[in-house]
Image: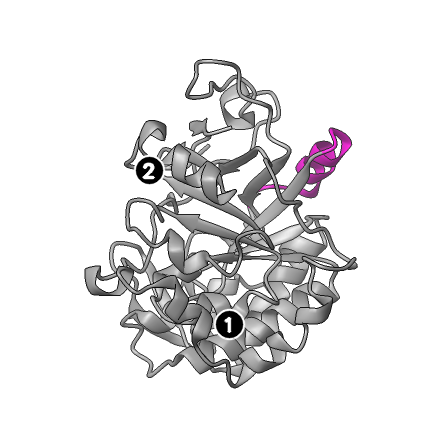
Amino acid sequence: MEIRVPRGVRRNVVLATVVLVLSGIIGASGIGGSAARAATRSSTSPSTSSTDWWVPSLGNQPWQWELTNPLSLTNKRQMGTADKLPSGGVAPAPVIYDIDGIINPASTVAALHAQGKHVVCYVEVGAAGNYYSAADEGIATSYYDQLSAAGVFGRAVPGWPEHYLDIRSSATVSIIESMISQQCAAKGFDAVETDIDESYGSDTGFPLTKADEEQYMTTLADYMHGLGLGWWIKNPDDTGDSYAADMEPLADAVLTEQCNQYKSCGLLSSYVGHKAVFNAEYHLKPAKFCANDLALGFNGAEFNVNLTGVRKPCA
């Protein structure tokens, strides 16, 4: 049963003047504030040493991204086990599943682990929508109601029944950390995909800055790592500044949407050869983007916008 609004579309559309910024500018930008804290970890970052959490390897990592429904372990489309490559050959079965952290139970995560898969927990950290009841979440008061009562809602997210969050608020941090603990760590997920983790570039209703975002996401990343969870940064190439590069030492992988369509893949240059990058395209066919993704070492695939399990992987 579908119980939530599909999430498969990027949030901050990169302005045409921004996507032309050379990736070299990003690499040369200074790192300050909380990003400096991340930079101090570079000598022991997941890309160069062992960690207490799972980090996806470089190279081809077949993956599935299904958010609309609870994952059905017997549905070949949702499981991605009957997909084709651009050549027409049979695509490798996914080894990584990125699924909604709230509507999927611990038993699904355990079943995927029994098959040798890794599982990523999708949650929103920069906005909230009233998609789930407290019963769905297994708690007394839903996270949405907690955030509403804390007075941290900002402007509506364009096109979605959601509100941006004041990421500067300690109440926001506390509630989102509880969600990560209860929905991701307690269910046995391996990592967390943090959606809307670059909201400072949007009209949130708050005077958010890059420093605010970096402080917030550094706090959450440290918390996730403390729980034994990896962190998948989401769409850091949306912002067109040094945010992606600043957060690279802390991030364990990247999930980007439509970086070929928006010509922003170059803004992820600091991750190339260091961290696994997963790219979802919605409106380009594999013939239009797979060559570029493969050349960069990205794990690219075409998905439908509703993220119902339909995918066309590059490799």
Q: Amino acid at mark 1?
A: Asp
- State whether residue 241 is above or below residue 86: below
Where does the image place residue 56, in percent across and percent down from the top left? 65, 46
Give neighbour class at mark 2: few <14, some 14-19, many 20+ (Cα, 10 Å).
many
- Type of the residue with mark 2: Tyr
Q: Which residue is mark 1?
A: 246
Counting labels gives 2
| Residue 3 in view | no
Quadrant of the rendered image containing residue 224: bottom right
Residue lying farthest to the left in this orientation = 16
Describe the element under mark 2 as helix, strand or loop. Answer: loop
Query: Any mark on residue 282, and which?
Result: 2
Sequence-first disc among 1 and 2: 1
Indicate the secondary structure of the residue bearing disc 1. helix
Q: Which residues are magenta?
A: 103-116
Q: Position of residue 145 (x, y in %)?
A: 47, 66
- Res. 219 in view: yes
The answer to which of 300 and 128 lies nearer the viewer is 300
Disc 1 crowd, CA 10 A, few/some/many (<14, 14-19, 20+): many
